[in-house]
Image: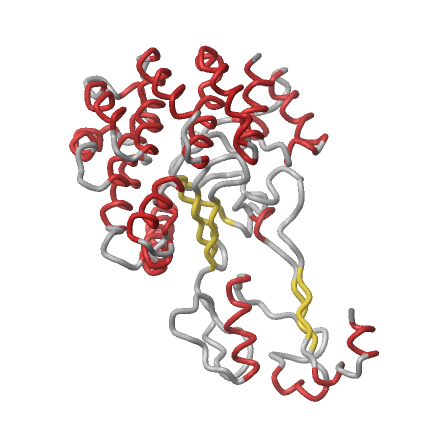
Amino acid sequence: ILEEVEDRGLAENTIVFYYGDHGGVLPRSKRFVFESGTRVPMIVRFPDKYKHLAPGKADSRKDRLGSFVDLAPTVLSLAGVEVPEYMQGNAFLGEQKTEDPEYAYFFRGRMDERYDMMRAVRGRRYLYIRNYMPHRIYGQHLRYLWRAQSTRAWQEAYRQGECNEVQSRFWQTKPPEELYDTDTDPHNVHNLADDPDYRSVLKRMRRANRGHLLDIRDVGFLPEGEMLRRTEKHDCTPHELAHGEHYPLERIMETAEMATARDPDHLPELRKRMKDPDGAVRYWAATAFAVMPDEGDGAASELRGLLDDPAPDVRVTAAEALCRMGHTEDGLAAVEKLVGHSRNKVALRAVNVVQSLGQKAAPVLDAVRAARKKGGYVKRAAKTALETLGG
């Protein structure tokens, strides 16, 4: 690339950014918010003409937290173009360079055919992770990731009981919160979230996460099917929806945090919120009983009522919760219908539920088989469910 720039006579007028992706098909790399999945290389080359814009001498290294979202404002800053207020990220070069940020922020959402929801905050030393779907294992089956022999071998070793406690975690459900000291624990193995000695760090980074999500109006607190349903209803983009009156994010986030904290004390309030006017609030309230099915005594009637909810994603989640609570007949009847839903993102979420329920969901595999005709990610997820559940 540098030779091409040179051959075109542009080398002395070109600042070159060279950077990598966040990994390929290695477990805990791409799609994971651990250090192994978020650290990437970056080199910036300044020609002599613009070396006054460089933050240091040639071959020097800068210790600043940054993200790819910083690239756009940085390029505008170097070009002398005013960075718009609505643009996320921080310029790290040029006249509009900001102070070094205290944190970098990460997210994990849908990964091809699998749904998960994690948000993370990285400071100078600590990494904080908030799991909004703690009832899903880290190592959900992705056809892309399973191309790697290392992934398949790891899973088989776990099935054979050959993994130790740390190695086994990848195949297990998640805690609501994680906190790691990246200086002493670069591989993010020792979760400090429940250690009283780190309570102040946990609270500080928890606040940072919440503040950032509210600041950017994180639309990921809407299930994808519900997000599409609302944007169509209000004839707007997801960004416009997130910044408008039809997205009560504060109440939705509050419900999501209560629902996924694994704290039974929240369940009485969450039962009330299953009747909330907002579908996303109802979705997260129902999620609590998928996360804590053993604590759901008495909530079955409310969950059955949600099987007719106008928001299909609410129906999916209520059905999963009922299945996990032992009301399998009612729950699977709803899942079977939703696997064939006309909106593919709803069908995909339903097939994810089938995969997560395992053999308990065997009675609906005919519906999963039929869903393969939808193609795309639904077909991928359906194929995996049939292969792993014996269909």
Number of residue marks: 0
Which residue is rendered at x = 58% and y = 24% of the image?
384
Residue 390: give x, y in percent of width and height.
57, 12
Of 330 and 6, nearer the camera is 330
Residue 23: give x, y in percent of width and height.
65, 48
Left or right of 167, for residue 203: left
Which residue is rendered at x = 50% and y = 14% of the image?
366
Q: Looking at the image, what colour scheme do you see?
A: secondary structure
Query: Residue 294, located in which quarter of the rendered image?
Result: top left
Left or right of 5, for residue 344: left
Which residue is rendered at x = 47% and y = 49% of the image?
107
> Considering only vertical position in the picture, is 268 above or below 92?
above
Of 57 and 113, nearer the camera is 113
> Considering only vertical position in the picture, is 50 above or below 245?
below
Which residue is rendered at x = 25% and y = 30% of the image?
309
Q: Quadrant of the N terminus?
A: bottom right
> Considering only vertical position in the picture, is 169 above or below 79?
above
Q: Quadrant of the C terminus?
A: top right
